[in-house]
Image (cartoon, rainbow, N blue to C red):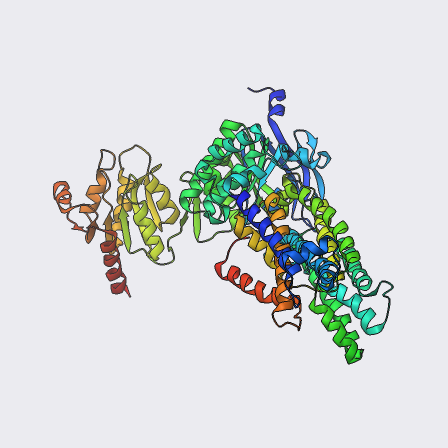
Amino acid sequence: MRAIFFALLSFIAILSILSGILIGSVNAGIGDLMDSLHGKENMKGYIILNVRMPRTLGAFFGGAALAVSGLLLQTYFRNPLAGPYVLGISSAAAFGVALYVLAGIGGGYGIVGSAFAGSAIATILILYIAARVRSAVTLLIAGLMLGYVFSAFERILITLAESERVHEFVLWTFGSFSGTTWNDLRAIVTLSIPVFVLTFLLSKPLNAMLLGEDYARSMGVDIRVVRVTVVAVSSFLASLVTAFSGVVAFIGLATPHIARLLFRTSDHRILIPATILLGASIAVLCDVVARTLLSPVELPVSVITSIFGAPIVIFLVLKRKKV
Amino acid sequence: MRTEMEVKANERMKTAELSVGYTSEVLRNVFLKARAGEILGILGPNGSGKTTLLKTLAANLKPLKGVVYVESRKIHEIKPIELAKLLSITLTERVDAGFLTGFEVVSLGRYPYVDAFGRLNNADVNAVREALKLVNAENLANKLFSEMSDGERQKIMIARALAQQPRIMLLDEPTSFLDAKHKVEIMLLLRRIANEKGIAIVLTTHDIELALRVCDRVVMIRNGKIVVEGHPEEAISEDVVRDVYEIGSARFDPSIGSFEITGRKDTDAKVHIVCGGGSGANVMRLLAKKGVPFTAGVVHEGDVDCCVARLIAAKAVCEEPYTEIGERAFERALKLAKISDLVIDTGFIVGSINRRNLELLNSSSNVISLRSKDELRKLGIDAKSIGSVGQLLKELDSLLLEGS
């Protein structure tokens, strides 16, 4: 049964990549894709190779990373409403970008660098706290508060900035996979795949964490190590995606729920690969919808993920499905 | 007589001069011993620090002072993964393991034994199956944890603790929030684990009745220290219970092992109950519940009716056990019956030693009886037969109305 689901998910994932490459304001067919892969140079080929492929693969890995990040935090906090951004990563990244775009401070490496620097600071702060608190709830509250502080500073910068720059900044916060280059993609892939593997190796303690910290500790789990690893890994994945694509909402929150409902299990050995495939497919498909729905105007991808994700969360809350 | 060596070998857990608490001391100077095959109950009212103590025993919390020894080793010197093979814990917090089956939750207990990827080998699967079997939960193996009742979840959590194959099991309030059926089932289960597996069990509870029935030894906590320790049969006395729980309106009788709500004693009794052989206990409880002051007698000491009467009646007339009702007791009971507005005959069995209770009924006026009319005629009692508790309540109501 599970094998069938995995086969189906893999099929959907491949299909989503194909649709990401072929669908858009300039329509292309499989033949065009083959042509471009064989080095035939034309306009379509250029778009496929240098615009759509990196963008689609960026969305693919970005979606997977957000979904895994959300899964880790939902398990660790035993809270169905946890997502990649509950610990303040997005606010901190936004603050970093605000400093660069609005105030012209920092940004040796552009928006990507300033976003990553912002979330790195938040990650270090939250890790410092994670290593010291006794319980998950304390950490969750600390993370939420940290997010508010970063948002507050970001708003000071917005208040003081020129409106043109504010517009540019706001567009970034909406999140988009467009503009992903092959160089970006190389960084995303080389950084995210090892982290996915590491997460998969954490399946055993993560499963024990389903019963809560006290039980996990009594079964021999080193809570502090798991906590710091979970926080580090999830924050890193969220920072990575945010740096290249801005704040993409809901994928991290909704995907783990869909995976659980689909496979009817909380076993991470199954959930981790499932959320990777699902998160990736959802992100790519949402990106396709975002750029075709009102074509040639491109909607922010968060608009689509939210419209798609919110009903799922409402459905889950109404049905009171247990995580 | 066991030698000292053997006693020592049986000792699974010990504390010395232990002080526990989060930041300030909640409990101090705790000396505990848990032995193989024995259930040690930590008793005390809610908020007395039982859970804090248990968490300290599980090494979840560092002691403020003193040491916890597991198998003669200091607990904080044992590696967590090794400790997990010696000691397991079951907590009160409600666990929501979502989409995990009963089998999967129990197999989490194999954590310290399985490989880095959590794969179960044959021995692990057998241990899980055996644990499920011991708690009578084989039927829950494939049921999702989120779809189980509280009682089923508790069984699974205990099976999970068993799957760790520990030498000591710690349980925090194992029967709280369970219904009567599951409460009894869990109690029997713990007894079986201690007896068959020889595991030392340490449990906390605020339920004295439970402690009396399953524990081999108990300690009672009050005001931050242990006030009584020993076999529950000796340690749980009425005075200790009253002292520890500070209950004014209910009294505890160790011989029947339960609390009784005290009847009103402030006004003159209007009802006298003639009972015996356990026929009167529930009638007396009913009157106490309704706040009707009453007296009772003659009853024989050692009879459950006597225990209950002593706890809750305004006055109880008791006779020496297994002796015929004597003149003194009879006269006293007769006096009480005479000044009552109503005398209740509970339908006690008449034998040689309580024959004079019939005389007592016949010497009283306004008697109502739970016996049938036929039986009343046969025994020659002049009384009004009432068939049910409902009717008895009606009689009481009219009596109370007249009085007011």
**Toward which corner of the image does residue B123 lie, by quadrant?**
top right
Left or right: where does residue A183 sit relative to residue A230?
right
Residue lying at 62% horizontally and 37% vertically, measured from the top left: B118
- Between residue A47 and residue A120, name the one nearer to us: A47
Q: Does residue A219 appear in this view? A: yes
Please provide percent x and percent y for residue B70.
66, 32
Instruction: Give the total of numbered labels.
Output: 0
Give the residue furthest to the bottom.
Answer: A163
Please provide percent x and percent y for residue A121.
80, 59
Residue lying at 47% horizontally and 47% vertically, measured from the top left: B150
- Between residue B376 and residue A214, name the one nearer to us: A214
Q: Please tell me whether residue B134 is drawn above or below residue A63 in the rendered image.
A: above
Left or right: where does residue B348 sit relative to residue B85?
left
- Between residue A242 and residue B221, name the one nearer to us: A242
Please provide percent x and percent y for residue B102.
50, 41
Please provide percent x and percent y for residue A207.
61, 44
Residue lying at 31% horizontally and 47% vertically, measured from the top left: B282
Left or right: where does residue A3 sit relative to residue A174?
left
Q: Please tell me whether residue A225 is drawn above or below residue A252 in the rendered image.
A: above
**Toward which corner of the image does residue A40 lie, by quadrant?**
bottom right
Q: Please tell me whether residue A212 is drawn above or below residue A28 in the rendered image.
A: above
**Toward which corner of the image does residue A29 lie, by quadrant?**
bottom right
Q: Does residue B233 appear in this view? A: no
